[in-house]
């Protein structure tokens, strides 16, 4: 990566939560922007990641760092500021956000969403601070119920959405230069339900830290991955299928464990490796051929992917799909996944929650040569199109274009793909 000096540009990223051990946008994009010479600050609340989820309280025990308001830390080239939070009308607001923005006086502010109090407060502060505002949309249609059902505009659900999402989102968009949707279906949600004009939406995928996630480089990494396989109890001939994330019903890794158990019973050399924790852990451990392992910090995950042969995420999408692909693994996902570019040439789909079809997909990857060929395609594409470094370069170009114009820059001068979907 070519590093540019851009020390005069100060960027603030607003995030509801922050976890150092995870590989989310709020960790990785600031790191890559900082390597380009940008002064980056991340403002987040003291809430833990996953606070909205109905998972057991000890799901991330010993893995997540707890924060105190007023904390400020600098690492990976950017500064993290932890502020307090308020619950207003059931939604999170960053306490003291306007004052912190006044103190930092950024040229660019980037939010993770075009709706909610954080986006509204950032849009209001822009009136007095004069920075350029960018937003994002990470809401997939699969987890946004209104996007997958036909409800008349006068229905209670649509009217509520109009009041609490569409109209506030349209107000935020009046102050916004651009909204980055991570997939086409996220762009559709932003346009149809969050009030974002299509002309301001750009599809910009989430990325991979290719410093961490890559195919084995040199003898040392080859030796390390072989040693890890032995430590976990896998032989050289085993076909190790890895899953990382929560062991919960919505993610459903138990389906993979059951598939591995059936393949073992049929004399096939498939094994399962599950990194994470959750309610399905005990059932996974009962399935023959499967090994569970606690959550690992993001900077330790690369060796686990390189020690495996196939990446499998049976239900909801995960950023780990990209990480596994960058490490040269072919991946298996369900047929409803909304980002087919993640598996083009390097992955297979199966019918969601269909055990027999998942077994069929696993057997399709039984041949080691096919796995290597597909894995090479994925690793090359992840490095070329999905690295956080390349995404940061495109974002920086957008930021600089916005700063050199009085209004939103024309589509032709901005990186990524514009969204021209239908409602």
Image (cartoon, helix red, strand yellow):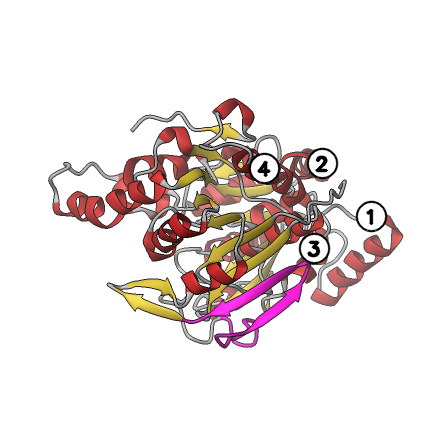
Q: Which mark is residue 173?
A: none
Q: Earlier in the sequence, mark 1 or mark 3?
A: 1
- Judging by the rendered image, the residue that carries numbered circle 4 is 400
In the rendered structure, the answer to whether residue 213 lies left or right of residue 408 reads right
Q: Residues within 10 Å of mark 3 (few under 14, many from 20)?
A: many
Q: Earlier in the sequence, mark 4 or mark 2?
A: 2
Give the Cα distance between marks 1 and 3.
Answer: 12 Å
- Judging by the rendered image, the residue that carries numbered circle 1 is 217
Residue 103's place in the image compared with 177, above or below, is below
Between 352 and 78, the one nearer to me in the picture: 78
- Judging by the rendered image, the residue that carries numbered circle 2 is 376
Residue 400's place in the image compared with 88, above or below, is above
Which residue: 56% across, 39% down?
399
Tell me, yes or no, whether the two marked residues, 4 and 2, touch with CB atoms within 8 Å.
Answer: no
Q: Residues within 10 Å of mark 2 (few under 14, many from 20)?
A: many
Q: Earlier in the sequence, mark 2 or mark 1?
A: 1
Tell me, yes or no, whether the two marked residues, 2 and 1, touch with CB atoms within 8 Å.
Answer: no
Between label 3 and label 4, give the one nearer the viewer: 4
Please provide the residue range marked out in magenta: 60-84
């Amino acid at each position: 990566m070519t590093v540019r000096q851009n020390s005069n540009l100060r960027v603030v990223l607003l995030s509801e939560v922050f976890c150092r051990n995870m590989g989310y946008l709020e960790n990785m994009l600031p790191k890559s922007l900082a390597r380009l010479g940008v002064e980056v600050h991340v403002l987040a609340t003291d809430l833990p990641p996953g606070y909205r989820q109905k998972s057991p309280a000890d799901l991330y025990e010993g893995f997540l760092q707890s924060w105190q308001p007023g904390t400020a830390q600098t690492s990976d080239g950017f500064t993290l500021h932890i502020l307090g939070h308020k619950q207003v009308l059931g939604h999170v607001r960053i306490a003291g956000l306007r004052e912190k923005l006044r103190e930092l006086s950024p040229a660019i502010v980037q939010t993770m969403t075009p709706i909610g109090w954080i986006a509204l407060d950032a849009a209001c502060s822009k009136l007095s601070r004069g920075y350029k505002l960018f937003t994002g949309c990470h809401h997939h249609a699969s987890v946004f119920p209104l996007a997958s059902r036909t409800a008349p505009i006068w229905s209670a659900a649509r009217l509520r959405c109009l009041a609490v999402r569409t109209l506030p989102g349209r107000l935020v968009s009046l102050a916004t230069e651009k909204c980055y949707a991570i997939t086409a279906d996220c762009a559709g949600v932003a346009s149809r339900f969050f009030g974002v004009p299509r002309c301001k939406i750009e599809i910009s995928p989430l990325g991979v830290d290719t410093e961490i996630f890559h195919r084995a480089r040199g003898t040392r990494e080859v030796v390390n991955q072989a040693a890890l396989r032995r430590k976990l109890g896998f032989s050289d001939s085993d076909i190790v299928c890895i899953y990382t994330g929560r062991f919960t019903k919505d993610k459903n890794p138990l389906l993979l464990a059951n598939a591995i158990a059936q393949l073992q019973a049929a004399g096939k050399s498939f094994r399962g490796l599950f990194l994470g924790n959750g309610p399905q852990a005990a059932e996974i451990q009962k399935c023959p051929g499967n090994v569970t392992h606690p959550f690992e910090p993001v900077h330790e995950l690369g060796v686990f992917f390189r020690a495996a042969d196939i990446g499998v995420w049976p239900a909801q999408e995960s950023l780990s799909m990209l990480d596994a692909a960058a490490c040269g693994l072919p991946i298996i996902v369900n047929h409803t996944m909304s980002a087919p570019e993640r598996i083009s040439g390097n992955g297979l789909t199966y019918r969601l929650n269909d055990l027999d079809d998942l077994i069929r997909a696993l057997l399709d990857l039984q041949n080691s040569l096919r796995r290597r060929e597909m894995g090479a395609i994925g690793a090359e594409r992840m490095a070329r199109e999905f690295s956080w470094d390349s995404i940061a370069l495109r974002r920086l170009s957008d930021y600089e274009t916005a700063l050199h114009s009085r209004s939103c820059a024309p589509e032709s001068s901005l990186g990524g793909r514009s969204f021209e979907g239908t409602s």
